[in-house]
Amino acid sequence: MKPLTILSYVLLSSLPTSLAHPGMGETMNQVKRAALASRAEAKQLIGDLKTLKDAQLTSIGKDIKAILLGTKGAESNTIDTSIPPGTVDSAACKADLCCVWKWISYEMTAKFNGTSGRCTKFARGAVRLGFHDAAVWTNTSTSGGADGSILLTNEIDRVDNDGLEAVADVFKAWYNKYNKYGVSMADLIQFGANVATVVCPLGPRIRSFVGRKDNAKAGPTGLLPGVDDSADKLIKLFQLKTIDAHDLVALVGAHTTSQQHFVDTTRDGDPQDSTPGIWDVAFYGQTTGSPPPRVLKFASDIVLSKDSRTKGEWQQFIGGQAHWNEDYAKAYTRLSLLGVNNINDLQECTKVLPPARTSFTSQDQVVLDMWLQGQFDQLNNLVDDAIMLSGVITNPGKKREE
Ligand code: HEM
Ligand SMILES: *[C@@H]1O[C@H](CO)[C@@H](O)[C@H](O)[C@H]1NC(C)=O
Ligand SMILES: *[C@@H]1O[C@H](CO)[C@@H](O)[C@H](O)[C@H]1NC(C)=O
């Protein structure tokens, strides 16, 4: 990492307070302005925000613009814990934009929250589904992006999407149930990714916008990354999506929750760090280190952890949970809006997301440790379902804080 990049990050995160600091002098202010400018320049605008003038922006349009430029965070704890005003069919519910989303949030949370306290394979699938719908887009595409096409066409059958079949069926059923209340597939998929992320212990609570338009035309092929791609190819591919190397490093951290099926079919269910189903930063350190034998590192993650353009940020995230959550939330917000050309007209339903879970106690660590060492080959539901562990734990007194 170039020193200036670290400096810009630190400065930008502390800008309002440090600007007010009297003893810093003109030189520091100049450095800060330069850092702000260089970082803002590096971040590109997308969709209608590229052409709209500030005076034309709605308050949500302004917020999203600031998130995209990196000057505003994308996490929020705004929560409405009241029960919805009525069933999804009631007039009271229909009169409230976020009511249907609250019912959807309940239904998604039930599917994504495992009895082990971790997020389930459906949650992990939902995050990947959100990525695979949105990322079929480049800065020269006239359609595609977060448009629901992955499930409204046969895109889902492409080899890129191997492993997403089960979660695809769940989302199609939700769409069939909720589309008549005005819910688009594009929104359902991106809202689902955000619910899944926050249901995973330690995951960020990402601001959630609705109003995307669906597109029943399949996007172009060849725009999703390959696990054997070089760092250079990956960085360039994401640059074409307006996602810079820094944001790419933040986004691949989603592999913290992952359990692969197709990279090595003889190791179905093997995780990408020792804490699958938990949104922690163990993934970053273990990709560059020596994790337990059950952990399968993706070649793509290894090359990104070593490339000069991405290595510095990778190192920053090791042990930097709050930093990573903040950067992931911003980067995912961008990803979730690729190809969306009515950003200024979106509305917000963040308040119906479940609360963030800022700590996790692993009740089944004894068994998990045995699994990580290579035992219990076929117990792929182990990390999801505490029920799988009944009668297996021999030393339930041993617990470990994650
Ligand atoms: C360098 C770019 C990336 C590559 C090469 C890549 C590749 C992969 C591969 C090969 C799998 C395993 C699929 C399987 O065998 O079942 C996977 C899983 C996953 N990916 Fe990525 N990925 C990338 C970026 C991302 C991004 C940007 C996100 C989300 C923001 C993401 C989220 C996930 C999740 C959540 C899983 C786990 C799915 C599950 O457990 O079922 N990936 N990825
Ligand atoms: C998910 O499950 C855990 C433990 O089983 C519980 O503590 C948590 O409150 C649940 N989350 C939600 C949003 O219901
Ligand atoms: C698209 O992105 C690439 C890589 O950042 C850039 O070189 C190119 O100028 C961009 N094109 C447009 C139309 O924005």
Image: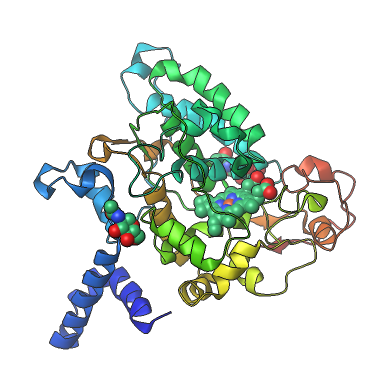
Q: Is residue 118 above or below residue 238?
A: above
Image coordinates of residue 158 in percent, x first then y, are 60, 37
Q: Is residue 388 visible?
A: yes
Front residue (pair 232, 283): 232
Question: Residue at image x 52%, y 71%?
Answer: 314
Relative to 354, 48 lies left or right: left
Name of the residue lying farthest toward the left: 55
The quadrant the N terminus occupies is bottom left
Of the four image quadrants, the one with ligand 2 is: top right
Q: How is the image coloured?
A: rainbow
Question: Residue at image x 65%, y 41%?
Answer: 162
Front residue (pair 50, 57): 50
Question: Residue at image x 39%, y 62%?
Answer: 244
Image coordinates of residue 232 in percent, x first then y, are 50, 67
Question: Residue at image x 51%, y 18%?
Answer: 177
Front residue (pair 308, 114): 308
Q: Is residue 228 above or below residue 209?
A: below
The quadrant the C terminus occupies is bottom right
Q: Is residue 395 above or below residue 37?
A: above
Q: Is residue 254 visible?
A: no
Image coordinates of residue 262 in percent, x first then y, are 72, 48
Front residue (pair 340, 395): 340
Identify the image quadrant of residue 401: bottom right
Q: Report the label total.
A: 0
Relative to 287, 290 lies left or right: right
Identify the image quadrant of residue 141: top left
Relative to 25, 376 lies left or right: right
Image coordinates of residue 102 in percent, x first then y, are 44, 29
